[in-house]
Image (spheres, rainbow, N blue to C red):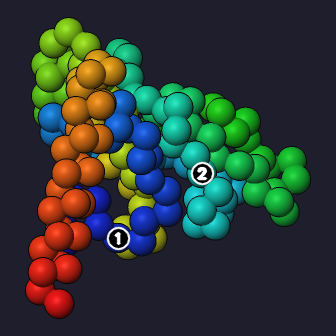
Amino acid sequence: MPKGEGNVVAQNKKARHDYSIVDTIEAGIVLTGTEIKSVRAARIQLKDGYAQIKNGEAWLINVHIAPFEQGNIWNQDPERTRKLLLKKKQITKLQNDLKGTGMTLVPLKVYLKNGFAKVLLGIAKGKHDYDKRESIKRREQERDIKRIIKSVNR
């Protein structure tokens, strides 16, 4: 199964708009019992999330997992920092990739693979406003071309 496939629970569509994705990497997430139940119910938001490497460990920061309704006292803080499961070689590769200016790690999607929650991280570089406008213009042109071809074929 290729990276990023499985039962997709949440996607970060804003990330592809705000960043140009250089590379992707799959990582596991350390979750508590009530958190995984909320993830399976698709109650997760990646919009403002990002990942950081601290002390040789990868951490997922600012990702909101809604509290499980029947969780009561076992619910965790929805915005807590969660550890990512990566191998040492992957972490050193990420550290080297992030040394460039303007590079960051953003979560692109969260999905379930063999019952485990995985996150697809993108090594990204921030886009300027003119880059965003250019990509929107290119997308609209491609859409117009497809529309014209479709009308000619009828």
| Gap in angstroms between the C-alphas marked 1 and 2 | 16 Å
Q: Is residue 129 left or right of residue 44?
A: left
Q: Residue at x 12, y 81 (%)?
A: 152
Q: Is residue 26 above or below residue 130?
A: below
Amino acid of disc 2? Ile
Coordinates of residue 93 in the picture (x, y in percent): 13, 28
Q: Residue furthest bottom?
A: 154
Q: Secondary structure at mark 1?
A: loop
Q: Is residue 116 left or right of residue 20?
A: right
Q: Residue at x 44, y 53 (%)?
A: 11
User: Which of marks 2 and 1 precedes in the sequence?
Assistant: 1
Name the residue tied to disc 2. Answer: 44
Q: Quadrant of residue 18?
A: top left
Q: Quadrant of residue 118?
A: bottom left
Amino acid of disc 1? Gly
Name the residue tied to disc 1. Answer: 6
